[in-house]
Image (cartoon, rainbow, N blue to C red):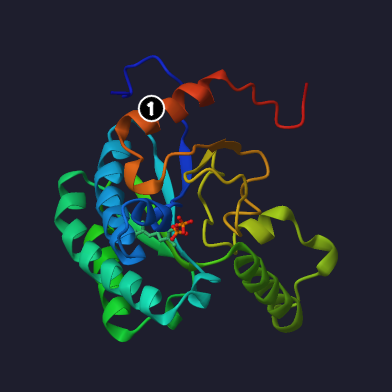
Amino acid sequence: MIDKDSGLHIPEHVGIIMDGNGRWAKKRALPRSVGHKFGAQNFRKITRYISKTGVKVLTLYAFSTENWKRPLEEVSALMSLFKQYLVDSLTDFREDDIKVVFIGDKSAFDPKLRELIQESEEVAKDRKGMLLNIAMNYGSRDEILRAVKMIANDVKEHGLDPESITQNDIESRLYTAGLPDPDLIIRTGGEFRLSNFLLYQSAYSEFYSTETLWPDFHEEEFDKAIMEYNQRNRRFGGV
Ligand code: FPP
C-alpha cells in the first residue's frame, strides 16, 4: 500500500476517467448496467483508498455531457446507481473525512438526484480530508463556454476591460476554481484520449492509460500508476 510515508512523490491532484464498465460486463455475458453497478462499487472503494495515500484532490469523471446519447435504459440505470451509491457513500466518506463536491451542470438531473447531490455536499462541507470532485453532466467545452459567457457578461455589465483579461480570469470561472491543476490523469479501459475531461486544466498533466477495466481497477492498479508517475520528468515547458 502506498501512503504518505512510502517515499514516493504523491500527486496533489489526480483525475480519473472511469472507462470500461460495459466491456467488463460484456466479457461476462452480463448487461452493461451490471458493469456500471460493479463500477460504482469500485468508485466507493478506490476513493477511500486514494484518500489515504496523501492525494489532496481526486476528480472522477462519472457522467459526461455527451453520455445522454446512450440508450435511455442505460442512462436510467446510471442515474439509479448514482442515487444509491451517493446514499451509501455518505457514511463511508464521513469515516474517511472526504469532502464531496459535484462539478458539472446539475440542472439536468431529476429533483431527487439534485437533492441528494446537495445533501452530500452539505454534510461534507466542513471536512478536512481529501476533496472528491465528482464530475457529473460535466464536459470541458461546456465548462469553458460557461466561463466565456461570464466574462462576456462582466465586460458588458461591469465594465471589465477586454485587454485586462488574464488566464486567472478564466481559471477562476471554471468548476475547479482555486484548485491545483491535475498532476496525473488516469484512464482505465485502454483508450488514449481525454473525452472532454479537464481540457483546460490538463495542459501539463501526466497521462496514464491502463488496459484494466474500471471495475477491476483496484488498489494495486492505483499504486502502479503512482510508480509510473514517479518515473516521469515533468518540465512544464522548460528544459
Ligand atoms: C464508462 O464505461 C463509464 C461510465 C459512463 C459511468 C461511470 C460511472 C460509474 C463508475 C459509477 C460512479 C458512481 C458514482 C456514484 C459517482 P463505459 O460504459 O463507456 O464502458 P465501455 O467503454 O466498456 O463501454
Q: From the top left corner, tell me how far across and down residue 20 is, in percent.
A: 44, 52
Does 95 appear above or below 91?
above
Q: Is residue 72 left or right of residue 83?
A: right
Q: Which residue is mark 1?
A: 223
Q: Residue at x 57, y 44 (%)?
A: 181
Image quadrant assignment for residue 53: top left
Residue found at the far right of this picture: 163
Q: Is residue 120 visible?
A: yes
Amino acid at dot 1: Asp
Q: Residue at x 66, y 53 (%)?
A: 200
Give the structural element (helix, strand or loop) at label 1. helix
In front here: 20 or 25? 25
Q: Is residue 129 visible?
A: no
Instruction: Estimate the x, y position of residue 79 in percent, counting from the top left.
Output: 33, 73
Residue at 54%, 38% (x, y): give it: 209
Where is the N terminus found, in terms of image quarters?
Answer: top left
For the residue pair 178 and 62, the one nearer the viewer reads as: 62
Q: Quadrant of residue 224?
A: top left
| Residue 169, quarter of the rendered image | bottom right
Structural crowding at the residue carrying mark 1, measured as other residues with C-alpha within 10 Å and reported as few (<14), some (14–19) or many (≥20): some
Give x and y (percent) for residue 51.
Answer: 30, 39
Residues 32 and 157: in front is 32
Q: From this view, report whether residue 155 is shown above or below residue 127.
A: below
Residue, far front: 29
In this rendering, is residue 133 above or below 139? above
Q: Position of residue 221 (x, y in %)?
A: 38, 32
